[in-house]
Image: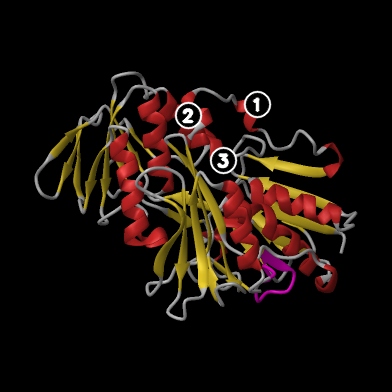
């Protein structure tokens, strides 16, 4: 194999190029990215960068990659994958031929339907964060739609900047799908303790304002005044350009545990990949930093035919979130029939650790707030299930 094209220049794409070099690939690596920025770290966008505590230079990921020897094609979007001829076609008509392709196109933020007035933001890219940062001045009224990780982190940062914040959440509690009702309620109380007005079980009917947003109207008729709005209602994998390529699309690019698709010489990693997970025994699409960093090692090994010597694939799904000065960490998997047991501390008074147990009382997941040492021990115990 003489050449590999990596489509996507965020963390998963960069980690793929690194993994190829670390595993001995000496051929040409071309990395295509739709943003003009060099690869940067996304987690700080909703926290330190949004708060003004980190600069664009602080986010750069490529400072230690002088030996990567990659050809960077930035500001270009892939529009087709020609698997018959091993070529990626770009939006300017350029065709990049190679022996293998890594799909690392990530995901994009979902947006509300219909016209969107000025002052309404999503937060997925550096440009998004720069635009939102200009809006978060002391006294500004911010409405966050969606109490997932991005919404909660933006709310936390905005409160710290002196904004008035309302959070609209369709579910009964924040993060209910991921953490369940009991622990989702704990996160809801965290918002309340810091003066954020949480509106659970509420749905948006309209964004009020013609040229610029002035309020968010809910289905029950209430209007929440807004100088700015952040829409955090999830993300869609960037896979449309792959239709007709032979790559199977099923809520993302379907792959095996290594990241291999059904097309020889094509692997997928990161947010766009719906990969089989040995821990859950089902495919999952994980939009988390750890997955984007670790999955490419296995995918690179699969491309190079070194499955037996490949580094261990990420075994246990893991994510973290920083909210209101607290470190929230979760590892494992929660199912609808799990019960929650407090193993350490007390959610009502301070740091705690909770275990998620299946009907056989086997621990399948662990959640911790401000208990990193205890959490690390349980995360290692969960990994032993594989």
Q: Which mark is residue 57?
A: 1
Depth check, front residue: 131 or 100? 131
Depth check, front residue: 154 or 302? 154
Question: Dividing the image into 4 quarters, which one contains the N terminus?
Answer: bottom right
Which secondary structure, mark 2?
A: helix
Q: Residue at x 73, y 42 (%)?
A: 72
Which secondary structure, mark 1?
A: helix
Q: Which mark is residue 194?
A: none
Q: Residue at x 46, y 45 (%)?
A: 351
Residue holding disc 2: 50
The CA distance from mark 3 to mark 1 is: 13 Å
Residue 248 vs residue 209: left or right? Answer: right
Residue range in magenta is 258-267
**Residue 111 makes an appearance in the image:** no
Q: Residue at x 10, y 49 (%)?
A: 220
Q: Which mark is residue 42?
A: 3
Label 3 vs 2, first from the N-terminus: 3
């Amino acid at each position: 194999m003489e050449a590999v094209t990596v489509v996507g220049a965020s963390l998963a794409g960069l980690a793929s190029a690194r993994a190829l070099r670390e595993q001995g690939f000496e051929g040409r690596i071309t990395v295509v990215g739709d943003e003009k920025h060099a690869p940067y770290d996304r987690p700080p966008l909703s926290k330190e960068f949004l708060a003004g505590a980190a600069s664009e230079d602080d986010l750069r990921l490529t400072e230690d990659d002088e030996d990567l020897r990659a050809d960077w094609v930035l500001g270009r979007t892939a529009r087709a994958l020609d698997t018959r001829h091993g070529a990626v076609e770009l939006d300017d008509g350029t065709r990049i031929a190679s022996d293998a392709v890594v799909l690392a196109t990530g995901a994009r933020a979902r947006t509300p339907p219909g016209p969107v007035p000025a002052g309404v933001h999503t937060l997925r890219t550096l440009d998004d964060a720069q635009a939102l940062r200009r809006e978060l001045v002391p006294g500004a009224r911010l409405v966050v739609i969606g109490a997932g990780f991005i919404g909660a982190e933006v709310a936390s940062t905005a409160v710290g900047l002196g904004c008035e914040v309302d959070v609209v959440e369709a579910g009964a509690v924040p993060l209910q799908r991921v953490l369940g009702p009991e622990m989702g309620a704990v996160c809801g109380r965290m918002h309340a303790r810091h003066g954020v007005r949480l509106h659970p079980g509420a749905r948006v009917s309209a964004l009020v304002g013609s040229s610029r947003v002035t309020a968010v109207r809910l289905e029950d008729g209430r209007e929440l005044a807004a100088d700015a709005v952040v829409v955090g209602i999830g993300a869609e994998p960037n896979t449309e350009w792959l239709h007709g390529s032979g790559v199977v699309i099923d809520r993302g690019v379907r792959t095996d545990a290594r990241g291999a698709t059904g097309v020889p010489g094509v692997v997928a990693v990161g947010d766009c990949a719906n990969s089989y997970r040995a821990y859950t025994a089902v495919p999952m699409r994980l939009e988390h930093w750890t997955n984007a960093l670790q999955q490419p090692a296995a995918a690179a090994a699969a491309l190079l035919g070194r499955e037996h010597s490949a580094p261990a694939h990420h075994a246990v799904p893991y994510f973290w979130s920083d909210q209101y000065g607290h470190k929230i960490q979760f590892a494992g998997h929660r199912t609808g029939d799990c019960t929650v047991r407090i193993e350490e501390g007390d959610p009502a008074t301070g740091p705690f650790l909770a275990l998620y147990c299946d009907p056989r009382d086997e621990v399948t997941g662990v959640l911790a707030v401000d208990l990193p040492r205890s959490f690390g021990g349980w995360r290692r115990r969960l990994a032993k299930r594989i």
